Amino acid sequence: MGGKGGSRGGTDPRRMSEGQRAYEARRAAKAGMTLEKWLIEKEKRAKEEAAALAKAEPVKPAKKPGFFARLLERAQKPL
């Protein structure tokens, strides 16, 4: 759930369905904000999360086993 929004309208209040608009309005009221301010904050958080994911360092490949680890592994294999 959640996701990127895609063709469903995202958080643009003009393109949201009535049900989605009501849901976001309840969340905004719970946070003590107006719907417009809530949507702006939500969009800002989404951009920050996307930037953090893009900034995260890539996963390094697994390190090759050391000399003794390879010896022990070969010793465990049947002849």
Image (tube, rainbow, N blue to C red):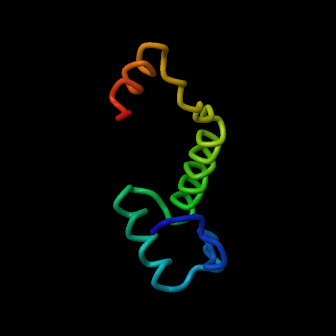
**Vertical position of residue 2 compared to residue 55: above or below:** below
In this picture, residue 65 sits left or right of residue 43: left
- Nearest the eye: 27 or 57: 57
In this picture, residue 13 sits left or right of residue 79: right
- Nearest the eye: 16 or 33: 16
- Residue 19 is situated, as x and y percent measured from the top left of the image, at 45, 84
- Residue 29 is situated, as x and y percent measured from the top left of the image, at 38, 64
- Nearest the eye: 27 or 66: 66
| Quadrant of the drawing holding the C terminus | top left
Query: At x 33% / y 29%, what residue is drawn?
Result: 76
Q: Residue furthest front?
A: 79
Query: At x 39% / y 26%, what residue is drawn?
Result: 73
Query: At x 54% / y 24%, what residue is drawn?
Result: 64
**Vertical position of residue 79 compared to residue 47: above or below:** above
Q: Residue furthest top?
A: 68
Query: At x 59% / y 30%, what residue is drawn?
Result: 60
The total of numbered circles placed on residues is 0
- Nearest the eye: 70 or 16: 70
- Residue 57 is situated, as x and y percent measured from the top left of the image, at 61, 31
| Quadrant of the drawing holding the N terminus | bottom left
Please tell me in which quadrant of the rendered image residue 43 appears.
bottom right
